[in-house]
Image (spheres, rainbow, N blue to C red):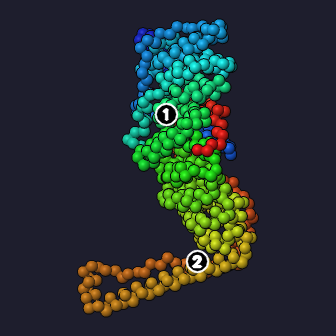
Amino acid sequence: MPNMPKLTRKSSKDKSGSKSSGKDGKDEKDCVESAKNEKKKSDKSDKSASSAEAHPPPTQIARINPLPETLKLKKEKRPGSSRFNITKNRELLKLPLLKDAAPAERETLFIEKINQGAVIFDFVKDPLSDIKFKEIKRAALNEMVEFITLNRGVITDNIYPVAVNMFAVNTFRVMPPSTAQNNAEFDPDEDEPMLEAAWPHLQIIYEFFLRFLESPDFQPNAAKKYIDQLFVLQLLELFDSEDPRERDFLKTVLHRIYGKFLSLRAYIRKQINNIFYRFIFETEKHNGVAELLEILGSIINGFALPLKEEHKVFLLKVLLPLHKVRSLNVYHPQLAYCIVQFLEKDPSLTQPVVTSLLRFWPKVHSTKEVMFLNELEEILDVLEPAEFQKVMVPLFQRLAKCVSSPHFQVAERALYYWNNDWIITLISENAATLVPLVFPALYQSKEHWNKTIHGLIYNALKLFMEMNQRLFDECTQMYKTQKLQEKENVKRREEAWGRISQLAHHNPQYSMFAQSNNAAPVAACSSFTVDELMEIDVDKLKAEVKEVPRKTVERTPLNRRSELPHDGGTIRALETHKRADPFLTVAAKESG
């Protein structure tokens, strides 16, 4: 405890009051400068992990990105950490090392150390209490992790009940209330998660249990008496923990249990479905959706063909409705991975999947619209031409609306589709149907307020021109004819209103009505105020398109929202967390 003497000296100094005010001010400045220096050292930028093809994209641990210099803001009081059932007798004796014990006594000593690990201490109300005994427990847990990793034949029948009990006693608990105030949505990009105060012990407990499950001596038939459905149900409840480090360990633990206990697989999938149903249709609040989807991504990858009806129902009734939730940005990469995995397994699911995406398409949420466009491009990358033809018309009708969107990020993301070689191949094979759908939106977007869109528009038009010159000319003439027809319709509508106005003037009561209501003459509104807009010069359009060289435009990242001040301790705790990803391997193919 290196900080204890410093706290003591400071308190005695404050009580004595013998130092001068000038020196006190200097000390305060030094403290502020040192605190700023420490904060500058602790502020690091997030590094997003690249997603592998055979594994779902990992859930980010430290999503918040603090500023180098932060202001001191008054924050509301946050709820405390989880409440554990503190053990009454917490006095522990330091036991001999396992490596020094005789082989005949090693199992008994191992069980005694596991029982010491089941002693629960207080890290919330009085974190400085029982420091000696907490250190004894921590040392015993670290020793057991090393012992079970380096030795063979140490997991006997007597070890299973005490090891599972130690994990259950330390981890299974009631989750504290959410830190989101006034039912506000928790945003992991800006809101600080509530970290578990007991994490110094919890982390080693999770590491031990993972080593226990991964040990070559582990026998699922012997452990199924203790790792049962009730155990799995309590384990799934922990996924609502706000601490991302704990959810990361839980993800790996549940994945290993799913792989080793065949009899629990259907039950695990059913309970995950229930969590998603409650999340979608009732609460819309759950902290572990991304981690659960990451596990399901590995599970779906191991589904045997042909897919069972149960799995198809899961896709249509559970995964697709997850797009409706407001907090889609928290788990969208993992959700998109699961959707693509299903389509790779069974391409016949393409039509219901795309139809559902178009039905759930956001109308006024530009950020979600960009996420939908990202997912749709991933789906198109795995589509076969025969399946593409079933959905191409409604899909490109929606794409045309996105191209003409006034929000530049939506229009920009939609125009990036023309940088995808496979999508261009699909368009060229169905150009007669698709080009007339998109051409009007592309031509109208030439007048977009954002200049970045202009280059992408001409790039797309140039591709269409190179793809089929004759079709491009026909689309241009069709667009011109359509606009002229719209102009004629407007003219006829104005003439009809003019005739109505003349008939109204001939009415004997018109003057009386006009004086009493101060009626002003009705002016017909026309959407075409400039005649030049209607004169579409085909040759001029071709010349403009040819002048623009075709090039692949790099995608620009979306603009992040303003960053809020964050706690440096939280940032450091999340950055020092070590993932257990080596244990999360893709499970072998299964029949159910």
* C-alpha gap between disc 1 and disc 2: 69 Å
Judge whether 65 appears above or below 161 on screen.
below
Q: Dot 2, how many residues are within 10 Å of its Cα: few (below 14), some (14-19), or many (20+)?
A: few
Nearer to us in this view, 298 or 563? 298
Q: Which residue is mark 1?
A: 229
Judge whether 91 appears above or below 57 on screen.
above
Nearer to us in this view, 265 or 3? 265
* Mark 2 element type: helix
Residue 533 tag number:
2
The residue sitting at the front extreme is: 221
Residue 404: image location, x then y, percent: 57, 65
Nearer to us in this view, 498 or 344? 344
Asked which quadrant contains residue 503, the reply is bottom left
Q: Residue at horizontal 53%, vertical 24%?
A: 164
Residue 298 appearing in the image: yes
In the rendered image, which quarter contains the C terminus? top right
**What is the three-letter code of the residue carrying label 2?**
Leu
Mark toward the start of the polypeptide (1 vs 2) = 1
Residue 71: image location, x then y, percent: 50, 34
Q: Residue at horizontal 58%, vertical 36%?
A: 262
Residue 146: image location, x then y, percent: 65, 19
Q: Residue at horizontal 53%, vertical 41%?
A: 266
**What is the three-letter code of the residue carrying label 1?**
Gln
Q: Is residue 583 left or right of residue 116?
A: right
Nearer to us in this view, 243 or 106? 106
Judge whether 169 appears above or below 461 on screen.
above
Q: Residue at horizontal 58%, vertical 20%?
A: 157
